[in-house]
């Protein structure tokens, strides 16, 4: 049963992730990413990371993707697919992708893949992955990270305002430049 | 432990059944479109709804920046809420002033963020 | 790490009933709610009629009881069509998506405690209320896709509006429930109901309750927050290009979500299944509270005019959000100090 669930989740997550890259319309990419996140949450659940699974859906599918959707709609890809084919990106993109792949491979192989071939721990401690357990970890082991997160969010709020202000000015210029009618 | 999530699958199956049925039943039960029906009514039927003068959805159809701002701010505060839930759940059982101070500091910092965006006028819809 | 995790109170979320019981109880919950929806549709029209000094539907069957059947029959007999600019597949899948996420959310509503071998709920999991938020964020994509894939500007505008509206009220909603979570010390809905043995949380958390209700109106696109489908300006919002049972799906999901929000509100604030009488009556009490709250939704519809869009946004961000934040702070202090 769990194997079946894992393979369904893994195939779904991988397939959706590929779709994100392959699909040409940005709006479809975002949708594929949402599907990917849902499957990923399922895999988290299989790993008993219940809180993480819920947080993944609420924050990523529910919040970050909303912004992406707005941006995709802003770019205006309703009818025609927008495919940024500037030559620089065509070269830089694959290089960065390969670099990322190598970096991740080093990290994965560096762990020695010691868990491969073993059945995994049988005795997951009671309450593992519950919000309560995560809460204890946040308050004890990762206190600084927790507070740093709130500071980071504050900085992000400032950044959002600055970015939006710049866009607003651009828009104003566009409108006064005679384009808006 | 995972077993307790099993009803989710049952509900998912029921939802897909009902949702799928609702989405397709009209194809089966409803009247069929006649092949080669080139009457004006049959063509007009496929037009999107319009009121007043006909207009195209312009290719540069854009939304105000408020939408992005709201979405960005939403991410910030959504993360705040998700962070606060696990801590809020243990607040009572730990019953320590230290944890309380952490929570208050966390919320206060984001309250500052809220006041900042408010003062900057980002919460005014335009 | 294990020693601190082990000390947690996890007794009841570990109860697991037999597989066949799980399947049967899921079916029962689903069928009960499913059959409530058409009744609710009729009830709303009847009540609205009374509020406006008219009879409401009374032609089909005694007291108009056959009206929901007639409505469904009418919707089913419509031609399935897809407008010219619509995106194939996505256009069809959007209404189904709203229904699927609404049905999935049903699983979290508790209708009673564990009695004998059966827990009177779909699931009782440690993430509890987060499950509700997770699926309400999935439901969002149903509306958005519906509006986007229709290829009509009214639909698209409605979808964008509803998107901005939903996210603006979701934070206040999340924070309003946080006070309850802090007082109960758990996210599991069953535990939260049990923690209300002495006093229902509507008393100490009255601010949270009101914020949650307002947020619930906004999340379900009910008047006075029905701007996504404001019929005076946007025709029918994201549902403009839909007809037949696909249109019915959006309506159906809306009513189901109304029941779910009522259910969450009764669970978190109104003592859930608690009420006088033997434990066997628990599900009845829960359903009763849900229906009473839903009637309140209808009552509000008949009473209040629609918000203007900028009013709606600033109400969510400038009033509800600060209020909810303060509520969280005060509750946190009170929980630790007392």
Image (cartoon, grey):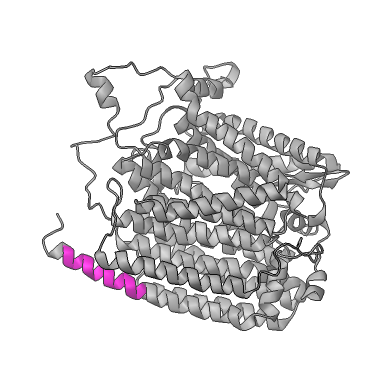
Is residue C277 at least partly visible in the picture?
A: no
Is residue B67 at least partly visible in the picture?
A: yes
Q: Nearer the viewer, residue A181 or A69?
A: A69
Name the residue: 40% across, 73% down.
Answer: B117
Q: Nearer the viewer, residue A57 or A103?
A: A103
Across and down, in percent, residue C256 comes to: 58, 40
Name the residue: 71% across, 64% down.
Answer: A130
Across and down, in percent, residue B9 comes to: 67, 43
Across and down, in percent, residue A36 comes to: 52, 54
* Rendering quarter of residue C63: top right
Q: Nearer the viewer, residue C30 or A34?
A: A34
Q: Is residue B95 above or below residue C104?
A: below
Q: What range is drawn magenta here?
A: A161-174
Instruction: Give yes or no for residue A170 being in the magenta stretch.
Output: yes
* Rendering quarter of residue B19: top right
Q: Is residue C71 above or below residue A48?
A: above
Instruction: Give yes or no for residue C98 being in the magenta stretch.
Output: no
Query: What secondary structure characterizes most of the magenta part?
Result: helix
Q: Does residue C155 appear to the left or right of A128 in the view shown?
A: left
State the quadrant of the C terminus of chain B.
bottom left
Name the residue: 33% across, 16% down.
Answer: B34
Across and down, in percent, residue A37 comes to: 53, 56
State the quadrant of the N terminus of chain B.
bottom right
């Amino acid at each position: 049963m769990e194997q079946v669930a894992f393979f369904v989740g893994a195939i779904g997550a991988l397939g959706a992730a590929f779709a994100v890259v392959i699909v040409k319309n940005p709006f479809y990419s975002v949708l594929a990413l949402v599907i990917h996140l849902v499957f990923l949450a399922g895999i988290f659940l299989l790993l008993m990371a219940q809180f993480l699974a819920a947080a993944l859906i609420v924050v990523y599918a529910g919040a970050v993707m909303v912004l992406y959707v707005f941006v995709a709609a802003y770019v205006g890809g309703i009818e025609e697919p927008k495919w940024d084919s500037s030559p620089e990106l065509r070269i830089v993109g694959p290089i960065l992708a390969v670099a990322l792949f190598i970096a991740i491979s080093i990290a994965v192989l560096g762990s020695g893949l010691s868990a491969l071939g073993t059945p995994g721990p049988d005795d997951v401690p009671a309450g593992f992955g519950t919000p309560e357990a995560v809460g204890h970890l946040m308050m004890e082991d990762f206190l600084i990270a927790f507070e740093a997160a709130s500071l980071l969010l504050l900085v992000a709020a400032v950044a959002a305002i600055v970015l939006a202000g710049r866009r607003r000015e651009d828009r104003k210029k566009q409108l006064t430049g005679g384009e808006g009618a | 432990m995972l077993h307790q999530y099993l009803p989710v699958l049952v509900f998912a199956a029921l939802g897909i059944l009902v949702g799928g049925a609702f989405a397709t039943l009209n194809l089966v039960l409803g009247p069929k479109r006649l092949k080669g029906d080139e009457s004006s009514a049959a063509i007009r039927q496929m037009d999107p709804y319009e009121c007043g003068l006909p207009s195209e959805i312009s290719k540069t159809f854009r939304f105000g920046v408020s939408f992005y701002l709201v979405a960005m701010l939403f991410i910030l505060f959504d993360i705040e809420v998700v962070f606060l839930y696990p801590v809020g759940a243990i607040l009572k059982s730990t019953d320590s002033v230290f944890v309380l101070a952490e929570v208050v500091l966390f919320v206060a910092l984001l309250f500052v963020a809220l006041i900042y965006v408010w003062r900057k006028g980002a919460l005014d819809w335009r | 790490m294990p020693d601190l995790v082990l000390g947690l109170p996890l007794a009841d979320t570990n109860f697991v009933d037999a597989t066949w019981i799980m399947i049967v109880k899921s079916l029962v919950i689903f069928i009960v709610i499913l059959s409530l929806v058409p009744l609710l549709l009729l009830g709303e029209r009847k009540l609205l009629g009374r509020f406006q000094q008219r009879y409401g539907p009374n032609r089909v069957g005694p007291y108009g009881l056959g009206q929901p059947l007639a409505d469904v029959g009418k919707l089913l007999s419509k031609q399935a069509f897809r407008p010219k600019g619509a995106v194939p597949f996505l256009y069809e899948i959007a209404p189904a998506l709203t229904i699927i996420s609404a049905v999935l959310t049903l699983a979290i509503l508790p209708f009673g405690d564990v009695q004998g071998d059966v827990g009177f709920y779909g699931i009782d999991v440690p993430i509890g209320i987060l499950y509700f938020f997770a699926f309400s964020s999935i439901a969002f994509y149903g509306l958005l896709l519906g509006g986007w894939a229709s290829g009509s500007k009214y639909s698209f505008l409605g979808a964008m509006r509803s998107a901005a509206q939903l996210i603006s009220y979701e934070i206040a909603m999340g924070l309003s429930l946080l006070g309850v979570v802090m007082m109960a010390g758990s996210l599991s809905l069953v535990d939260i109901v049990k923690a209300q043995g002495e006093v229902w949380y509507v008393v100490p958390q009255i601010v949270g309750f009101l914020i949650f209700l307002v947020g619930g109106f906004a999340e379900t696109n009910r008047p006075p927050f029905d701007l996504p489908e404001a019929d005076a300006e946007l025709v029918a919002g994201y549902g403009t290009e839909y007809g037949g049972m696909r249109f019915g799906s959006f309506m159906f999901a809306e009513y189901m979500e109304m029941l779910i929000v009522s259910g969450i509100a009764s669970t978190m604030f109104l003592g859930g299944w608690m009420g006088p009488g033997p434990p066997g009556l628990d599900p009845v009490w829960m359903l009763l509270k849900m229906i009473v709250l839903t009637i309140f939704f209808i009552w509000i519809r008949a009473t209040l005019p629609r918000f203007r869009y900028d009013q709606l946004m600033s109400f969510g961000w400038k009033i509800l959000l600060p209020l909810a934040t303060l509520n969280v702070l005060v509750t946190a202090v009170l929980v630790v100090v007392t």
